[in-house]
Amino acid sequence: MAETTFFPRRLILGAAVICGVLLALAVHMLGARYGLDLGGLWHSDTHEFIPAGAAIAWWLIATVGFSGGYFTATLMQSAADGQIPQRMRQFLIAVGVLLLAGAGQVASAPSPIPTVAGVLAGLAALCLGAVMAFCGAHFALRRG
């Protein structure tokens, strides 16, 4: 019988956080292309209390970062036990590659928001995605 391979918890945590951050940044870039401006909260020329596009962008990035970290940590624990079917593994790889390829294509186009605001929004998305991905991965590892 083959022995079960266990990944160190820090390796799973690190990989899950990286995956969650990449997914959150990809969603940020795709959302910016479709008008979900993350920096809309800092605009002083709006008459609304909180612009809906900014609120949706913040929640979307937080949700994708958390779920990306959580599901990556869960899948890495299952993969060590050999519990993931081959078709599921191939499907997840294809979805990840397509999402990151779409974000790369969007990132190569001209930005719809000014440069300084785009950099600040990107850094905010990076920090939000990192915190939420860490929380998701941490909860997945504590559960398992």
Image (cartoon, rainbow, N blue to C red):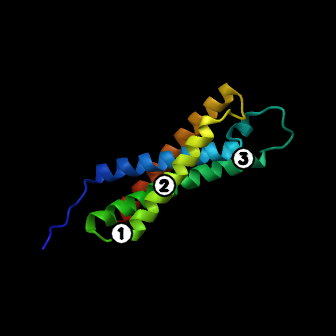
Disc 1 residue crowd, few under 14, some 14–19, many 20+, Cα 10 Å: few
Query: Residue 131: in sight, yes or no?
Result: no
Identified by mark 3, the residue type is: Tyr
The one nearer the camera, 18 or 108, is 108
Which quadrant is the N terminus positioned in? bottom left
- In primary-sequence order, the first of circles 1 and 3 is 3
Distance between the alpha carbons at the discs numbered 1 and 3: 34 Å
Query: What percent of the width, then of the height, locates residue 115?
Result: 67, 26
Element assignment for label 1: helix
Q: How many marks?
A: 3
Alpha carbon distance from label 1 to label 2: 16 Å
Q: Position of residue 86 (x, y in %)?
A: 36, 69
Say which quadrant the C terminus sits in. bottom left
* 1 and 3 marks in contact (CB < 8 Å): no
In this view, the mark in front (1 or 3) = 1
Depth check: give the residue in front, 25 or 38.
Answer: 25
According to the image, label 2 marks what residue?
Answer: 96
Report the residue marked by disc 3: 34
Query: Mark 2 is on which residue type?
Result: Gly
Q: Indicate which disc, 1 or 2, sits on the residue closer to the N terminus.
A: 1
Q: Quadrant of residue 41?
A: top right
Q: Residue furthest top?
A: 116
- Which residue position is annotated with label 1? 86
Q: Residue at x 61, y 44 (%)?
A: 28
